[in-house]
Image (cartoon, rainbow, N blue to C red):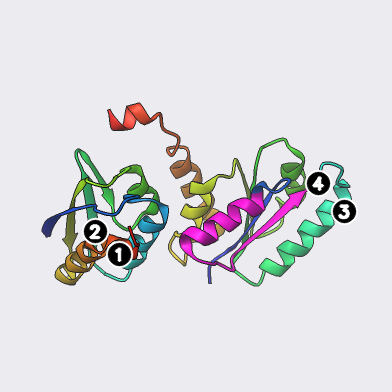
Amino acid sequence: MIEKKVEIINQKGLHARAAAKLINLSHTFESDILIQKGDNEVNGKSILGLLMLAAQMGTVLTIRTDGPDEGHALNSICELITNKFEENK
Amino acid sequence: MAFGIIIVTHGEIGSSLVETVHKILGHNPRLDAMGLDWDVDFEVAKKELGKKIDAKREKEGVLIFTDMFGGTPNNVALGFYQNPGVEIVSGVNLPLIMKALTLKEDTTVEDACQILKDEIQKTIYIAGDLLG
């Protein structure tokens, strides 16, 4: 298992469409993906889990990946978040 | 092939939910909505729903979401609850539909009902309880 911390920098945070993009990306990997905010850790392949984090701009998330493609998964997810989920703001 | 979903509600609740889900998750042809007018004829509504169920039956079963148990949309749907491959879940909301569409492709309509009931009852939060 590997992990990395990443800050949410888009204005709307991890909102519904952003969470949908994240789970679509997560589902392309075989590895298990866990996303943590504070004491809450959720499945990175569950949209309702991600939304439950209520992660707003400025939140630092810990991403954990575990499996055969964990490196690729971790980098891709962190990239999506640092690219503001491909949003303008 | 995954099951189809029909949302049966009073007025435009269902079509608004479908539109919103399409915006969030992208357009999904598995979803359909049927809104009942206040003066709707019960038998006419039942016939219309029957047609919609038949159209979705090409897929692996049909899951009907209704807005409220005991309301007319729910009662119209109940006319089909003994049909093979048709399940009815009341209390539709946005998380319920999103969860249903993001279940594993091979989830049966029967299994989906149980998963959704268990999951969705946990999606009503008092913000303070969650965020501290």
Q: Is residue B32 magenta?
A: yes
Mark 4 and mark 3 on one chain = yes
**Judging from the image, what secondary structure is the residue with disc 2 in?**
strand
Q: At which x and y percent is residue A17?
A: 41, 57
Label 3 – label 2 distance at C-alpha: 48 Å
**Judging from the image, what secondary structure is the residue with disc 1 in?**
helix
Label 1–label 2 contact, CB within 8 A: yes
Label 1 – label 4 distance at C-alpha: 41 Å
Q: Is residue B80 magenta?
A: no
Residue A26 is labelled as 1
Give me the residue at 74% from left, 44% from top: B73
Q: Nearer the viewer, mark 1 or mark 4?
A: 4
Label 4–label 3 contact, CB within 8 A: no
**Judging from the image, what secondary structure is the residue with disc 4 in?**
loop
Say which chain tag 4 marks.
B
Label 4 – label 2 distance at C-alpha: 45 Å
Q: Disc 2 designates what residue? A: A33
Q: Please tell me which of labels 4 and 3 falls first in the chain.
A: 4
Q: Which kind of residue does numbered mark 2 sit on? A: Ile
Q: Disc 3 designates what residue? A: B44
Q: Nearer the viewer, mark 4 or mark 2?
A: 4
Left or right of B46, for residue B30: left
Left or right of B124, for residue A7: left
Residue placed most toward the observer, A64 or B63: A64
Magenta residues, start to end: B14-37
Residue B37 is labelled as 4
- Badge 1 crowding class, 10 Å Cα cut-off, few under 14, some 14 to 19, many 20 or more, is many
